[in-house]
Image (cartoon, coloured by chain):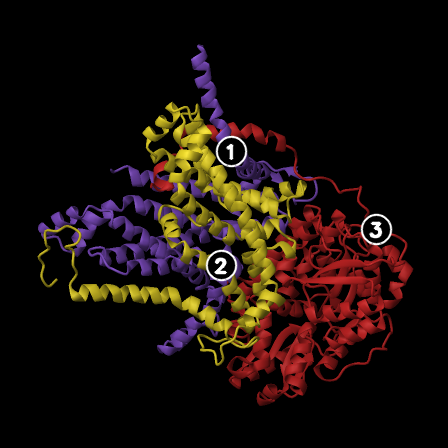
Amino acid sequence: MAHPWTTAYRPGRRALCGALLAAPLTGCAALTPGSGPDTSRTRTVPRATAVPAGDVTLRLTFADAPEMVDALIAAFHKRHPNVRIEPAYTQFADYVKSLKLTMASETAPDLAQFAVGMNDVAARGDILDLTPYRDAYGWRERFPATALDQLAGSGPGAGRHLFGVPAGLSMTGIYYDKRRAARAGVRRPPRTLDEFEAQLAAARRAGMTPLGVGALDSGGLHLWAGLINNAMPPRDYRAWVKGEPGATIRTPATLRATRRLVDWSRRGYLSESANGTTQVDSTGGFIRGGSAGSVFLVNGNWAAGQVAEAMGERAGFFLMPAERAHARAMASGFSVSYAISARTRHPQAAGAFLDFLASRASAKLVSGFGFLPPDGPGDTSVPVPEGVLGEVARAHRRVTADDGMNHFPDFTAPDMLDPLRAGVQKLIADRTTPGEFLDSLQDVWREHYSRGGGR
Amino acid sequence: MRAGTPTRRAGAGRTASHTERWGGYGLLTVLAAAVVVPFLNVFLASMQPSGKPVTGMSWPQRWSLDNYREAWSVAGFSELMRSSLVIAVGVVPATLVLAALAGYALGTMRLPGGDGVAALFVAGLTIPVELVVVPLYFDLRGIGLTDSYLGVILVEIALFLPFGVFWMRTHFRAAPASLVEAARIDGASSLTILFRVLLPLARPPLMTLGVLVFMWSWNQFLLVLVLVQDATKRTAPAGLGFFVGQNNTDVPMLAAGTVLVMLPITLLYLIFQRSFVAGLLQGAFKG
Amino acid sequence: MTARGRTRGGRRLRGYLFVLPALAVYLAFAVLPALHTAYLSLFDWDGVTLGSWAGLDNYRRVFTDPALRGSVVNALVLVVFFALLPILAGLLLTALLARHRRPGMAGYRLLFMLPQVVPLVAVGVTWRWLYGEDGLVNEALDAVGLGGFTRAWLGDFDWALIAVGLVGTWVLSGLCMMLFLSGVHKVDPQLYEAARLDGAGPVREFVSVTLPQLRGELAVALTVTTVAALASFDIVYVTTGGGPGEETTVPGLLIYRLAFSAGKVGLASALGVVLSLLILVIVYLVNRLSRTPS
């Protein structure tokens, strides 16, 4: 028998005729693609909050902290035995990629974790505006204002809505192994950036890997953002993330901060295979120690539970220091929050779950998993845990008190994550200059917001 | 070469010297090892205790199928494989029937413009999934065929038909024309000729096409990744792709999942090796 | 027209009833979407709101945007590993083995073609571990005293694309080898007899007898492997996700990202069209070249 490629493939006149024959058929598709927002669908939750009495099953998709979500669901089920929640976990990078498609599909889950791109989902009307519940349940008194602000949409009109409710808050910083640090002569967390740099150098001199970075996925951008948070006035940074006209990420200060990252990499302060290591793996290496064990580790509070369990008293945590001592405490952070699909048939039950997240029981659960409970203003009823979990919680209180929580930089635009991830990898490998890197981010930003993104 | 005198008996006479013979086998065995080692590595990893960081190739201390049980039930590979099976079972017979019918008409009847239609099918051999997947998502969503087995099945049939039609057409064309003529003179209708005369002769090519289509369907990734967002309807490769990042730390369990995804198609390959080899060597390509 | 003529004409057209089901499915779910892609490539559309006419702007960007252009270049580099290396390996093996029939070949053939049969996603996952920092590749390097050469292969700017490419070499080499070996066995043994009586050595025998006879198989191998390289997605998606930097992004990956997470459906469509045209041109050239000199 003959090969299709050699005997039959004569893409000459005949194939062309065939193609032309088919062409008129596309006539029926010849409309400008897309549609305006669907105005027929409900865009806001109902005013009523009463949970229906019958059996209800809600589906929840999420990307962070599976154990915590299971525990929250179990606790919620105890209060509302007629409501069952089926969780579906997806790894974060894939979650972000498929989020818009998932939420636009007719089989969208009832509840979904808020992530990058959710603002666009909100703009399309695929998730519900929760403001009636906010007022009915009194969420403004029970969650910190900054946490709710981050969930209020983007672009013009931002702030008037609410599209998600936080279960736990997240924050990045730096873990360290006290035993290994002592071997390098480091006995306390650094108070300034220069002191930190000196500690990294000391760790390197002592023959250890100074700073563990899992830059294969998002560890690299946490490191970069940590430096940027302290280099840029928070107002300017937040204007950039929210797409306010005239905002820019390229300033002399950010250039300096970015240059520092390149510098650290050149001097061998970062783990050698940072670009080939995922965040999870870099944490694993930090915990296991051994030859790959680093003295410091860039990661977020979500790793705190794992670090505390494996290392106990040996582990510590601090925020990326600023240039000056006693400066405003800054960190990147967001919340593990959930939104309600506009296609749900049970908005009241879903709302009850969100309200459960504001409860004391939920806060206790959440802090047990290394997340920071979303205490309302001045609420200190949840006790600060011991060890590294306590260090994370105290650092978080400082950041909240200083209003120092910045959005993660990839929240700027749905297609910002890839340039950020790839760009920081290039910085680490010395394949791009800080100027080029910042320009490329600004290009993505400009394109997104000039197209009317985020509205 | 030792003797250097080829005997007269063609073919059978091409005997090898010892060095050449064993050198040849040696080379083949080295290459075979290169093929086997990655498979062996993933298999051995799947036998390590769950959650253990796996380094290089290490012999398990204890043989156990725990990871497989875990992957099968807890991680949901049983559901993933069921979805894959449902889709493949939908795609294979439909493709065979449609390809046989079209191949028969285009191969044995002189249809006006038939060659053009055949060329249109052949042109489809070059369509990469990347070219069609974007509008398919939006079009199928519009008619409710995303997150549905039917949507994936229809698209896969369409993507595999160019090869299928070509394959069956080539076969039917090679069938002796006298056979068809004789049947026609006896007053047999076109359908009768196809089912009574030609198809019984076409079992080997149909078989080959069937296993190839099953393989392409089982292995399809990008299409399912886009068209199926519903986690409960994902196929085995799509599930594995989603799964990779999640369980970075639990390599043994993920390895077990990987073996599970490879197993059905490998078994099929071993059972139907003749059809597979024939198909792959006769110009099929990975779908 | 006579009655007889009419029935014959009718019968001929009735033949289309057999073609119609296949044609309908093929047109509706492959040809139309392909044309729809070409159509979408002329718009600036985020997949949600109303799009706007963009003309050829998306195509301009495919050729000027470094990331997009880079992905096409990466795909072309992959052709070296997916097509050239397997074909060279196949030819070498054929040259070494083809002079004699060997019992037991069926077993080897079965094994060599196995990588071609299993899902590429599973292949990618497997190689991800092999290339890992603690993976088998580094372990092997350590064992032979090349410990200084170890690295996280998939995270290395210089090596990631090569590492991904070699996975393709691993997958496709067996197919090429078996394709050529089976092609050689169709060669009339008398051609070899004649060459040997002329005193031809292994090299001359290969060049003057074997190679010309493999023209068809070469064309098939080149087409199949080149398409596999240009349209690669699965392996890259699970091994590197396109990184580090943009070292291993391929068009397929960008099409997926642009259309479904970045909301640039038009640009993704334009890239899809360019990719398909590239494949079409290469397939056409290969088959053209394989035919002319005969």
Chain coloured yellow in this rendering: B
Point out residue A145 in the picture as x, y percentages from the top left corner. 83, 65
- Quote the CA–CA distance across marks 3 and 1: 46 Å
- Between B104 and B51, the one lying in front of the other is B104
Q: Which numbered disc, 3 or 1, marks the residue closer to the eye? A: 1
Circles 2, 3 touching at the beta carbon (< 8 Å): no
Q: Amino acid at mark 3?
A: Thr
Q: How far across and how far down the image is residue A204, in percent? A: 53, 82
Label 1: which residue?
C23
Q: Which type of secondary structure does the marked residue at label 2 adopt? A: helix
Q: Residue furthest top?
A: C1
Split into 4 quadrants, where in the image is the C terminus of chain C?
top left
Residue type (three-letter) at the residue carrying disc 2: Pro
Residue at the image position 20 percent from the left and 50 percent from the top: C207
Q: Which chain is the one coloured purple?
A: C
Identify the residue position indicated by label 2 in the image: B264
Check disc 1: other Cα within 10 Å, few if <14, some if 14-19, many if 20+: many
Q: Quadrant of the N terminus of chain C?
A: top left
| Count of numbered marks | 3
**Which chain is disc 2 placed on?**
B
Q: Is residue C202 above or below residue C275?
A: below
Secondary structure of the residue carrying numbered label 1 = helix
Q: Indicate the colour of chain A.
A: red
What amino acid type should be assigned to the residue bearing mark 1? Leu
Chain identity of mark 3: A
Spatial separation of the CA atoms under disc 2 and disc 3: 48 Å
Residue under circle 3? A44
Mark 2 → mark 1, Cα distance in angstroms: 31 Å
- Which mark is nearer the camera, 2 or 3? 2
